[in-house]
Image (spheres, rainbow, N blue to C red):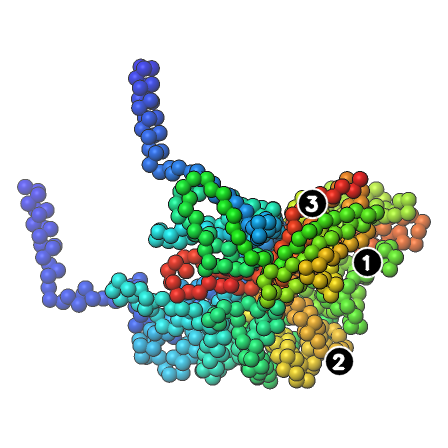
Amino acid sequence: MKLKFLIIFTVAANMFLAGCGYDNFDAPELTLSGRVVYQGNTVSVRNNGPQLELWQDGFPLRSVINVFMNQDGTFSAKLFAGQYKLVRRADAPWLQQATDTIRVNLTANTNLDVPVTPYFTITGESFQKSGDNIIAKLVVNKVVQTANLEFVRLYLGKSILTDHVQYDVRVGANLSNVVLGQQIEIPSGALPDNLKSLDYVYARLGVKSTSAGEYYYTQVQKIALK
Amino acid sequence: MKKIYIAFALFIGLTMNSCKHDDWFYRESKNIISDEQLWNDPNLITSLLANYYNRLPSLHGVFNTGGMTEIDDAMWSGTRDQNGRNDFQYGSDYGRYWDYGLIRDLNLSLDNINTLGVKLTPAQKSLFIGEIRFIRAFVYFEMVKRMGGVPLVTKQMIYDFSGDPTPLQIPRAKESEVYDFIYKELEEIKADLAANNLIKTRANRYTALALESRAMLYAASIAKYNSLMAAPISTPGGEVGIPASMATDYYNKSLTASKEIIAGPYALYNENADKGANFYDMLNKKPVSEVIFAKDFALGTKVHRFTYDNIVKSMTEDNEASSAISPSLSLVESFNYLDGSEGTLKDKDANGNYITYTNPADIFANKDARLFGTVIYPGTSFKNSPVRMQAGVAVYNNGSYQLTTSAVLGANYSDGQTWTGFDGPKDDAVDVSNTGFYIRKMVSDASAASTRGTSAVNWWPWFRLGEIYLNAAEAAFELGRPEGLGYVNSVRARAGFPANSISVLTNDIIRNERRVELAFEDHRYFDLKRWRIAHIVWDGTETDPNAVVMGLYSYRVVRPGHPDNGKYIYARVRPTRFRRARFFRMTNYYSSIAQDVLNNNPKIVRNPFQ
């Protein structure tokens, strides 16, 4: 009796299990990773901000594959092997190149540098602590000749996610003092009480063009206060 | 043997019907209404129109409690599962509206009433056609203000099964062309709609003019302020963006329509000597003088639950959720003082010390009476009973106040007096104000209005005269004409300001007037959009009091032996449940177009930033 039950049970279980093969798909296994670069330097962005888009032709319905970016300008996506088109969309600190797609032929794990053209860049940034004050030194460069400067800002924050949305101190440079291509200074002023007592703060610089909705950022730097 | 009889009987029965009168088979159906019947019966057409009127679209309107808590006027303080309203950024599809199902229904109705409605009198026919065209213009206006230019479809489209769908693929019209279409339609039908002039819930001549006034103002301000942006939002084909040169014409059209309404049979509602109560009554009592076009509700047939959702916690007559909308401090402070000064509340003096007030409501004294009509603040009353709002007590200790709140609402402090009031405010709590304010506007004070069994029946105002005055003021101001000042001053006089309280009009005054007069009436999101300042006001910055919904908590001072004992102080707080500052990005000026729409029609141009 028990044997019969076991046989029936095993056969039934096998039949049910076998059914799974038909309606399950393999998960995508290939990784497309990379970073957004300008002249070899990674362009860092706002956390939860700009995105890239992937599209794939050859199917009756097209739908976008959003590629989210880390704030340091890197990204990665799990994909099936195939031909993809990568689009640099607007709502970013770089020029929209919606029709100028990058073709990606994905056959193995791929690392890709996506070149972009930011409106402005910041180079040679450094941060110095003097007393309660943090002084940022930087050079603002214009890349797109038609662009106009809107803000050059220093952000200080308690967390490594520091940007225009999440910060504790924000200081803007006086635009009339900003000479493109030459070093300028932005002093933070005396740190507020909630930052003063910390062991370290995170600092970041951002520059925004009037043509863009997003800032071009420098990489976040950790500044020891003690 | 028996079977033979049965077979015989069946045979007789089956053959008996085969007589000549086969019109028996052609009787009118008892349960299907044919197109011919529908379009020749005014009663049936009216009930079809009721369906269309009920489908008029809005974003944060028609008592959409959730939508009202997604901008800077309020935060969500209802159930936790909807706390996403306090913790989101506007997606690129926020406000997407692409309702060609409704457009098709309307176009089909227009085709059918023209071809089939032979028994209607010409007056009936032109009235119905006018109403359907009004609804269609309204829907196109809702689409253009959210999506930019959309395909203008004015006839029903029929597929010919030829295998070629291109005749059905209509490209997007220019943004200005959609506004021009709305204007042309309304101009053509407004005379036909005059028969409805005494009806508030159907389109009449003044409703058409009111839509004209609003739509033309939107077109004009987009034309003007988009061009003033550092990088105007536009597409090469004009699907998005209106040339600056068209602004003056649109402002003129808006002003003309507004003036015609103001000269019409309406008056600003001003029946109650108490200006604050008067402003509340204006949207609670169904006043025919002020409201031009309303969505009506009636007990037993069609009700709404705005009062159930939002009534003051201790006054709810139901046993579940209440108090979902917590108005923001920035809204409260946008109501100016009656002497004309800025509305910033005086909670601390120049040295940073708390200012004490004898009564909880004293800090709100001498403010614009519309504050009372819009918001419930500490020390005021609702339904003739005082609200019990107090966040906690402030105990004076070693030279500073320690602010403490009780764990339960309505508890007493050790001195035997109220600690935290029954109505909060309480931080991080559900179904009680999280900002220190409740909404009064449009929350009905009728008996049992806050029960789900009865619910509320006050009107949703689609258009009212207060808005038309402000439309006229803005259009006149932009055109450099002097009469704008009078319109703003009339609206302010109704709110308790002295006559001619403003002598020089500015953009900021007009914009602030719109915020306070039309709060929670589905205007602010679109107003900030058309002035192209939404990305500046809602810049996503966590420390910006405009982008963050802040609260103001009242505390009773416990300082025995000191003159301040028993008085009240106020503290600005950021409610814990408000998680993320409002963040409006460039892409939000025009909602993205759905991918399936783009897939189906390759002629559709994407919106900028999409």
Quarter of the image that includes the N terminus of chain B = top left
On residue B239, which mark appears? none
Residue B403 lies, with reference to residue B272, above or below; the image says above
On the image, the x and y values in percent for residue B493 come to 72, 76
Q: CA distance from mark 2 to mark 3?
A: 52 Å
**Which of the two marks, 3 or 1, is nearer to us in this view?**
3
Q: Is residue B608 left or right of residue B83?
A: left
Q: CA distance from mark 1 to mark 2?
A: 29 Å
Of residues A67 and B128, the one drawn nearer to the viewer in this rendering: A67
Counting residues from the start of the chain, the first of labels 1 and 2 encountered is 1
Secondary structure state at the residue bearing disc 2: loop
Of residues B95 and B498, the one drawn nearer to the viewer in this rendering: B95
Secondary structure state at the residue bearing disc 3: strand
Q: CA distance from mark 3 to mark 1?
A: 38 Å
Task: Give the chain of mark 3.
Answer: A
On the image, the x and y values in percent for residue B63 come to 57, 61
Residue where numbered disc 3 is placed: A221
Residue neighbourhood size for the residue with mark 1, other residues' Cα within 10 Å, grouped as few (<14), some (14–19), many (≥20):
some
Is the residue at mark 3 from the same chain as the one at mark 1?
no
Q: Is residue B430 left or right of residue B46?
A: right
Q: Amino acid at mark 3?
A: Gln
On residue B347, which mark appears? 1
Residue where numbered disc 2 is placed: B503
Q: Amino acid at mark 1?
A: Asp
**Which of the two marks, 2 or 3, is nearer to us in this view?**
3
Residue neighbourhood size for the residue with mark 2, other residues' Cα within 10 Å, grouped as few (<14), some (14–19), many (≥20):
few
Task: Give the chain of mark 1.
Answer: B
